[in-house]
Image (cartoon, grey):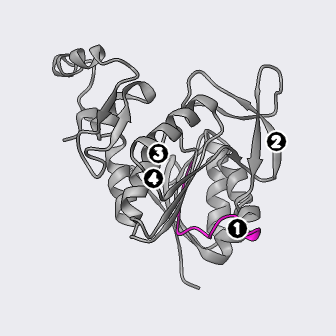
Amino acid sequence: MNFSGISSNTMLGKILRSPLRLIPSNARIPILQGSLRGKQWIAGSGILSCWLGSYEIEKQKAFSAAIQRGFTVYDIGANVGFYSLLASVLVGPEGKVFSFEPVPQNLEFLRRHVELNKLSNCFVWDAAVGSSDGTASFDLGPNRAQGHLTAESYGALTVRTVTLDGLVASGRLPPPDLIKCDIEGAEYEALMGASGILAKYGPTIFLSTHGPEVHRRCCRLLEDLRYRLTSLDGLPLDRTYELLAIRQEA
């Protein structure tokens, strides 16, 4: 059941949510449904739908359908780890998941979720993915889910940046079979820093873009690399910000 689809503005939504507010934010609770059913989750680490198991339920289904056992998955902008946990289950012990997250509080929850669930195939990288290796300023945003790289340094956090091309070329990471990327507007830079592996290995990409110009640039780049783009939410390609990109055969 898609619990998230029941609006909190309706009477039913209010009734269903009211007892959930009594759960301590640091409580360990089992995820209620889906492929992650029974996995341990920190109640206050993310939005309610994560531990209900209904978070982005349609995207979850598409993500699950695209992953095979033994895959190598990159979770770029892992936040507190919902998709990392899901990928870990789906790839099985033969596969690997590499989770990239620069926000300290998110990293703490991400690592706790990995440890609580004994995910031996999931590896956390304390870094932002971009178009160059080094450091960058990071604006924490209005909440932990909306932090982003920024050109402004005043009041910003300094984070390490890595390129996927550099990590694969150096042998520190195996090439990916699938990439999930949701990094609040820095998606184009991440794709630019991965253009070599995208051209060579053609991983499937689940991409959330932020803003029309970033969206257009990402679409052009992927289409130039022979990717076929489809919308994950049913909207036309020029109006959606949720993309599935699959490499076409030469």
Which residue is under mark 3? 114
Q: Which residues are magenta?
A: 168-181
Label 4: element kind? loop
Q: Amino acid at mark 4?
A: Pro
Q: Is residue 178 above or below residue 7?
A: below
First along the sequence among labels 2 and 3: 3
User: Residue 25, image x and y in percent?
Assistant: 39, 20
The image's mark for residue 168 is 1
First along the sequence among labels 3 and 1: 3
Q: Amino acid at mark 1?
A: Val
CA–CA distance in space, label 3 to label 1:
23 Å
Q: Quick one: 116 or 20, which is closer to the camera?
A: 116
Which residue is under mark 2? 135
**Left or right: 128 with respect to 13?**
right
Between disc 3 and disc 1, the foreground one is 3
Between disc 2 and disc 3, the foreground one is 3
**Left or right: 49 with respect to 191?**
left
